[in-house]
Every structure is written in C-alpha cells, then in structure tokens.
Amino acid sequence: MAHLAVSDLHARYGTVDVLKGVSFSMKKGEVIGLVGPSGSGKSTVLRTLVGLTPASAGTVTINETVIDFSNAASVRLARDQMAIVFQQYNLFQNMSVLHNVTVAPTKIKKWPEAQVRQEAEKLLAMVGLADKLAAYPDQLSGGQQQRVAIARALALQPEILLLDEVTSALDPELVNEVLDTIRRLAGEGISMILVSHEMAFIREVADKVIFMDEGEVVEEAPPETMFDAPTTDRARDFFGKILRH
Amino acid sequence: MERIIEQLPRFFTLDNMVLLAQSAGLTLAMTAMGCLIGFGLAFVLVYLRQTPGLWALPLRLVCIAYVEIFRRIPFIVVIYLVLFFIQTVTTDASLFTIAVIAICIYAVAYTADIIRGGIESVAQTQVEAATAMNFSRLRTMVTVVLPQAWPVIVPPAIAFAVSFIKDTALVSQIGVFELTFRGKELNNQGFSALLVFGTIAFCYFLMSFPLSMLGQYLEKRLGTPRGQRSARSIRNG
C-alpha cells in the first residue's frame, strides 16, 4: 500500500489550470525528486498537498486516509501528517529560532513543552545551529534560516517532508550546508518530496524522479534513467537544455 | 492688553486652575477611553472584514461600509447623531458617556484603516507558513501577524489619538465640561477671550506635545529590527 497516493489532482489559479491531473504514488521512506521547467506546477503540487492552494479535483490518500480538500477538518488532517519547507524559509520573524521550532508542536499538537524543547534543541544541533537558539531570523544568513526552517518542519514529526526549492533563494556558497542536512535526512529514511533545480543532488538522493511540464506528469523514472535516458521528448528536451553545461 | 494684565491675578486663581486641570483631565480621559475602546473594536472590525468565504460577504460589506461612511462624516455630526439617537433610547446616559461613544465610533473608522495597513504590511508567506502548520486564523493573527504588524500600527495610531485630543473640543457643543467648554464659561464670566483661550491653547499643547514626542520616539525605535527585538524582550520580561 502506498504511503501517499495522488490521483488526478487538479488545481487552478483564477482561470488558469496549473495542475491538469497529476498522479503519482510514494512508498514509505522514499525520496521523490520533482523536477521540470518553471511554471510546470511542481511547487503547486506541494502547496495543494498542504491545502495552501485549493485542489479543484482529484484525490490524495495518505496512509489509506482519503483527504477531502473541501472539508476543513480533512485538510487539517493532511497538514498534520506533512510539513513543508518553503523557498523563502518563511520563519516567523517575531520569534526566536527556538520559538520558531517549538511553537507548533506545543500550541498546535499540544505536546508537552519540556519534551518539545529538548527535541527542538536536538534538531537545531543536528542542523548545526545549537548556538543560535536565542537568535532572531533577521540575524541569520539565508542558509542558517533555511536550516532552522527544516528543523521547524521536522519538529512536527511529519510522515512526509515537502521541500519546495529550498536552495533556490540561497547564495551559492550557502547551498551545500542545506543540501548536507537534506542528504542526512534522506539517509535516515524520512519520506520526502523534493522540488528542486539541483539535478546532481536529486540524482544522488532521490529514489524516483518525476518530471512535470505544463501541469502534468510527463515521465516518472529512477534518477539514472531519467537523467541519462529519458523516454519522452519533453523530458529529453528539458534535461538536454539544463544538463548540457 | 491692560485689561489682560489687570485680570491676571483674578484669572490665575487656584480655583480656576483646578477647574482647568479637571476639564483637561476630562478631555484626556474622553480621548483615552474613546480611542482605546475604538482601537480594540477596530481590531475586531478588521478581523471580521477579512473573514474568508462567500457566506461572509455581507459581513465584509458591512465592515467596509462602516469605515467608508464614518470617515466621510464630520465628527460634529457624529456627536449629534449619537446624542439624539441615545436620547431616544434612554434619558440616563451622561453627556460624558455620549461623548465617549461618539469618539469610539469615529476612532474605529479611522484606526481600522491604520490596523489594516499594518496587517497587510506583514508578508503573506508568514500566514502561509502558519496555515501549513495548522494554525487557526485567529491564532495566526494573534501570534504571527499582529506582533509583526504593531510596529507599523502603533506610531500612526498614537498620532491619531494625539490629533484627536484637539478634536474632542467639538464635544463642548453638547455641553460636556471639557477644556473648551470651560474656556467658554470663563470667557462668559468676563475674562478676556485672548487670555482665556490663550491659556486653553497652552493646555492642549501641554497634553498633546509629550504624547506626540512619544509617538515619534516609538516610530524611530520600532523602525529597526533591533529596536523591535528589544521592545519584545521588554514586553516578554
């Protein structure tokens, strides 16, 4: 049984169809790389999964529970099992690093404070920020903020971690510190969907690569096949363009 | 001029000064109560105005209409409307209460836009991050948006309250014993208008100047992330 099953997912912004029937499935512990040109709908898939962009049709099943996106309680249930990390980190600017990580587990999940705090300190140490607990987001570099954002997502103990172009906004020299963190998580067997333009990285950590274009899944394959011998013209064209240099 | 000098000892008596201080206090109390209650209600109004969903459309329209209407009515007209409306309902309400209600109604309409501006200055991505973590709309507002919006809200809100200290002079029209009313009274007792209203003017200045300095100080201080952090640490003990 699939851990996550997305079937015929549709979404639109206004009158524009951004997702035109996206389907894929994910096993527990799997790392999926979601790639494709800008505007292909990769990020929208993640946003739809956590109910930030409303799905107009289709079904999403997490651990055999079907999510009804027109039902607020059902969407909450989906959000309860997934955590998303954004391109622009979106740390709460009014909260310290530690508070950013602990606020949702204590206030939303209602987990015991002492335990959450301990776990948060452990996570922040794991992402190499043990000495920044009291700092505020605007005192940190982009790479540090993004690592806090990852710790914040992990503190929710999600079934599935969604990473939305988490290195795109970073200066090149800061990309690796974030990728190292993700590499480690992949090694620990956390289920992840990784929207990214870091093809070499996806090739390294992903179990499966999904290529999207114009709101559709065009091709789905293991990384070696996808990057070296894509079977569809559109994928060949895309990877030909970006991997040439 | 000679008349003023001749009147000075009789005007600046302890009794008169106590009377002036009392009415100045009344002016401040009216402004503070009206603006504080109005400010609180304005938050509620802005929150209701942002209720999503089609079913809330009438609610949103009412909120928008309230702000647009009361911002276009002169304050003195609001005062008379409140006075006559309340007098048809009850004869018990004091003029002070009526004045505070009128100030509230006016302050809600004006500060609602200040608050909305502050809330809209907070990046939508902050709201999205909270939503994705299952924060309710109210919790997002209280724990994420408002703490970031208040540096934008507080300085103009204080500026509004300060300017309103002056505008409360209009409630003397319905006979509240505030500063301007007292001035008219002293003037009627035969004191030179120049002397009386010169003193009254000075009283208004004394009340609003320190407050507007405070507003400017807060604006400077809250204008930087560092200032905001230290303000937060003071607030959180």
Image (spheres, coloured by chain):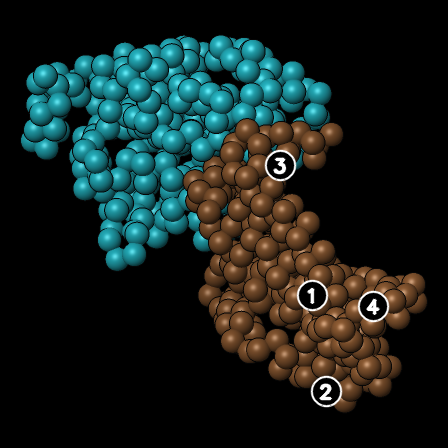
Chain colours: A cyan, B brown
**Residue shown at 18%/37% (left/top)?**
A213
**Does B146 sit above or below residue B237?**
below
In the rendered image, the residue lying farthest to the bottom is B88
Q: Are marks 4 and 2 on the same chain?
A: yes
Q: How far, Cα to Cα, is label 2 from label 3?
A: 49 Å
State the SS at label 2.
helix
* B169 on left or right of B139: right
Give the residue at mark 3.
A108
In the rendered image, the residue lying farthest to the right is B15
Q: Are marks 3 and 1 on the same chain?
A: no
Q: Are marks 3 and 1 in contact (CB under 8 Å)?
A: no
* Most foreground residue, A121 or B192: B192
Give the residue at mark 1.
B201
Q: What type is the residue that disc 1 sits on?
A: Ala
Give the residue at mark 4.
B8
Q: What type is the residue that disc 3 sits on?
A: Ile
In the picture, residue B77 is in which quadrant? Answer: bottom right
Quadrant for the C terminus of chain B in the image: top right
State the SS at label 1.
helix
- Residue B84's tag is 2
